[in-house]
Amino acid sequence: MSTSNNDARPLAGLCVLEMGQLLAAPFAGMMLGYFGAEVIKIEPPGGDAIRTWRGMENGTSLWFRSLGRNKRSVVIDLRTEEGRGLARKLAVKSDVLLENFRPGTMEAWGLGPDDLFAEAPGLVYARVSGFGQTGPYRSRPGFASVCEAMAGLRHLTGNEGEPPVRTNLSLGDTVGGLHAMIGVLLALEERRRSGKGQVVDVALTESVLNLLESTLPEAERLGVVRGPSGSGITGIAPSNAYACACGRLVVIGANTTKLFQALMSVAGRPDLAEDPSLADNPGRVARAAEIDAAIGAWARGLTAAEATSALVEAGVPVGPVYDARAILDDPHFRARGVIERADDDGTVVTKVAPVLGRTPGRTDWVGPDAGAHTAEVLRDRLALTPEVIAALRARGVIG
């Protein structure tokens, strides 16, 4: 049983064994744990590598404190036979196993799906990798950056004729983690009817491909290969970022006729608002540069706050380009409780979406120290005695 009060949350009673490191599978584990699952995270000696990435506080990255929230950390050396035996015992007592090792690693350890299904036929076995468990690229290492490139996302970012720009996040990993959670929930729902588990095969490349809208059919059927579009978007106008007098940017989207006419009226361009050739999106796309120039000239005469206020009043979608500090200070986000402060150490973390009205998720604790729950989990789930646990620790099997 989990140490937190998860009874009201939708995934209460679900046990998840997380064996992945870094980001993709752990992101799925974080989502599941937020909504009530008991998540047991197996870490190697020294802990998950992400513990030492980016901003650190008291020896652990704030990234890990967020990503590891609500998880129970167990340090097991999977390079040892005894360690793999402990992992197997924990796996067959779990509802879900999450892993994101290179394909073939779990099989080499005797922890592959066929090894575990014989003893735990109801196990949902979620596997996240760069290219999936089959196909000629299956054994390639697949970090998010590479998968974003090969799935076509990087080709769409930045400015035409320049090297692609990366979003300063590991987007491919988190999108893969979201798909893993969706797959787990689908498999659990099917298990309610059949009583059987199954493998959930998540490829980062395919998770990114799911975001690419109509780019593939456009290329195959129309011969049109969409490319980068700077701060705008292909085939929709107006939708762009505009500089204001204060030096800040606002993003404005007015891509329906009604919204376009409202925007042009506010911007003092009734001639464009009333132009019949701009009454539909194709017409506006053909004259996107002219429209952007008109909006840009208007925005440069106002501060971002003034431009935002004027367009909000007119019902036109608009928003300033925020950095992290602006998000923390925004009154709407504060009112929505988007920023949580963990009870155990006060760390600020983002509330996990979506918001459930009757059974919401919550952060019970931030990512714990490596191995903080090793003895507790081995005692509670495997009924190991303190003497056995001490002997395993002395042999370096656990930490």
Image (cartoon, grey):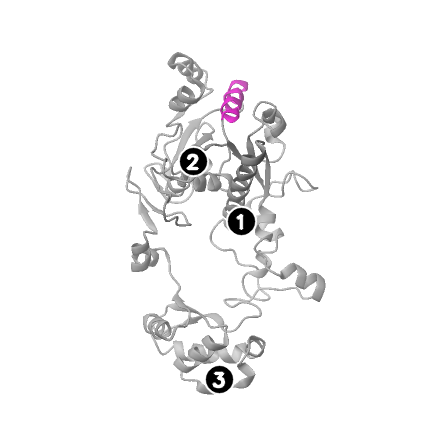
Disc 1 and disc 3: Cα gap in Å?
40 Å
Magenta stretch: includes residue 88 = yes
Q: Residue at x 58, y 56 (%)?
A: 153
Compared to residue 215, the image places residue 286 above or below, namely below
In the image, taking residue 276 as reference, residue 328 lies left or right, namely left
Q: Is residue 12 visible?
A: yes
On residue 141, the disc is none
Q: Amino acid at mark 3?
A: Leu
Query: Helix, strand or loop at disc 3?
Result: helix
Q: Give the class, few, some or many, for how many residues have Cα within 10 Å of label 2's Cα (few <14, many ≥20).
A: many
Magenta stretch: includes residue 320 = no
Residue identifier under label 2? 37
In the image, taking residue 135 as reference, residue 256 lies left or right, namely left
- In percent of width and height, residue 254 lies at 47, 73
On residue 272, the disc is 3
Disc 1 versus disc 3: nearer the observer: 3
Compared to residue 242, the image places residue 209 above or below, namely above
Residue identifier under label 1? 172
Q: Tell me which segment is drawn in magenta.
A: 80-93
Mark 3 vs 2: CB contact within 8 A: no
Compared to residue 64, the image places residue 339 above or below, namely below
